[in-house]
Image (tube, rainbow, N blue to C red):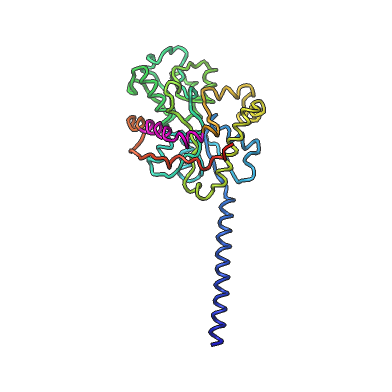
């Protein structure tokens, strides 16, 4: 009997130790997750510049967050799909493309609306959209490029078969403009400003297709589950940077000019044609006005399906837009 009781006590103590070890391992695992680096990727676009301003201003310190700038939107999409990025700056149509491919991710912030920043720029001798018939047009093979081009052609009563399209990522657009055989380019900032300085003429821009080109910050389901603290810190830094851009524009421009390698007086020109929602507007778009946000997204989805830009129909619902990671009100 004494041996049985002694064995029982020993087993109980060992079980207790095992439980303690298990709890410790779980806590250690949780701590490790909180220390994992959040990888955030984007292409070069003014609407994402607040993230880099946040980094340069120290607003992202305190959490392991790495910003990864890629040369074009196609590379960003590929990196996000492969799992190399936790969070990505994408256009809304690119997000819909992800969903159609079966990837699970949510929109956690609206970064900007393009209201003239995406453009079709032509040679100065081309005075109207109708003169694009037979033209050679360069554009990046993305939904944004296709949407803007389709809007321009529709305005001129032209079809894609009446022009010659040449695919080139945005980081090659400056070089392609030097080729005299190219008549027009579908592009965006900062290339837009450089081509205008080189004599280009804007024939069509995103103001003429309102609400169709929207940039969003998208997070994978895995990162939302495992790196929620880092994501909240990232968004807090983003909105702090937006506040800085409004309250201390000269200081913000000075910081951004160094990274962008342009003069300080040209920084704000890059933001022409962009509407950037602040925290209050983001809460409105992702919470109280979510039905309208969904309605606009549905309209974009229909346009993409009609233009063969989406490989299958997808169901959209409120769970795809998540305001839970935005900073507290006020």
Residue extent of the magenta highlight: 282-301
As drawn, 131 above or below 115: above
Residue 24 located left or right of residue 105: right
Q: Residue at x 56, y 74 (%)?
A: 14
Disc count in the image? 0
Front-lying residue, 54 or 322: 322
Toward the bottom, the furthest residue is: 1
Q: Does 82 sit above or below residue 164?
A: below
Q: Quadrant of the C terminus?
A: top right
Side (left or right) of 302 relative to 210? left
Give the residue drawn at x 37%, y 33%: 298
Give how far across and how far down residue 258 sits, in percent: 64, 30
Q: Residue at x 58, y 33 (%)?
A: 50
| Magenta residues, dominant SS class | helix
Using the rendered image of the protein, determine whether residue 175 is visible from the camera's viewpoint.
Answer: no
Let me know if residue 291 is in the magenta part.
yes
Pick the front one: 176 or 240: 240
Residue 67 sits in which quadrant? top right
Task: Indicate left or right for 54 with 80 as reference.
Answer: right
Observer able to see residue 8: yes
Q: Position of residue 135 (x, y in %)?
A: 39, 18
Query: Does residue 90 show up magenta in the picture?
Result: no
Is 239 in front, or is 270? 239
Q: Position of residue 9 (x, y in %)?
A: 57, 79
**Residue 26 rendering spot, x and y as whole percentages:** 55, 60
């Amino acid at each position: 009997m004494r041996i049985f009781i002694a064995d029982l006590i020993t087993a109980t103590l060992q079980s207790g130790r095992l439980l303690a070890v298990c709890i410790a391992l779980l806590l250690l695992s949780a701590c490790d997750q909180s220390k994992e680096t959040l990888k955030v990727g984007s292409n070069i676009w003014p609407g994402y510049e607040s993230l880099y301003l946040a980094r340069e201003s120290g607003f992202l310190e305190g959490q392991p967050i790495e910003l990864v700038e890629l040369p074009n939107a196609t590379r960003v999409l590929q990196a996000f799909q492969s799992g190399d990025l936790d969070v990505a700056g994408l256009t809304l149509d690119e997000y819909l493309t992800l969903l159609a491919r079966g990837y699970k991710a949510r929109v956690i912030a609206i970064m900007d609306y393009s209201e003239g920043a995406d453009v079709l720029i032509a040679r100065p001798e081309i005075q109207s959209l109708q003169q694009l018939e037979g033209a050679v047009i360069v554009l990046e093979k993305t939904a944004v490029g296709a949407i803007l081009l389709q809007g321009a052609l529709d305005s001129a009563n032209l079809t894609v078969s009446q022009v010659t399209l040449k695919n080139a990522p945005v980081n090659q657009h400056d070089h392609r403009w030097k080729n005299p055989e190219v008549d027009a380019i579908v592009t965006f900032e900062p290339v837009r400003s450089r081509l205008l300085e080189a004599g280009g003429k804007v024939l069509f821009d995103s103001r003429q297709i309102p609400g169709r080109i929207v940039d969003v910050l998208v997070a994978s389901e895995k990162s939302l589950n495992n790196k929620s603290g880092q994501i909240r810190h990232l968004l807090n830094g983003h909105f702090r940077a937006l506040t800085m851009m409004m309250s201390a524009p000269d200081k913000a421009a000075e910081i951004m000019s160094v990274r962008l390698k342009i003069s300080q007086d040209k920084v704000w020109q890059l933001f022409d044609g962009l509407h950037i929602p602040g925290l209050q507007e983001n809460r409105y778009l992702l919470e109280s006005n979510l039905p309208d946000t969904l309605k606009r997204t549905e309209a974009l989805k229909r346009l993409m399906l009609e233009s063969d830009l989406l490989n299958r129909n997808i169901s959209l619902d409120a769970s795809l837009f998540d305001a839970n990671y935005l900073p507290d009100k006020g």
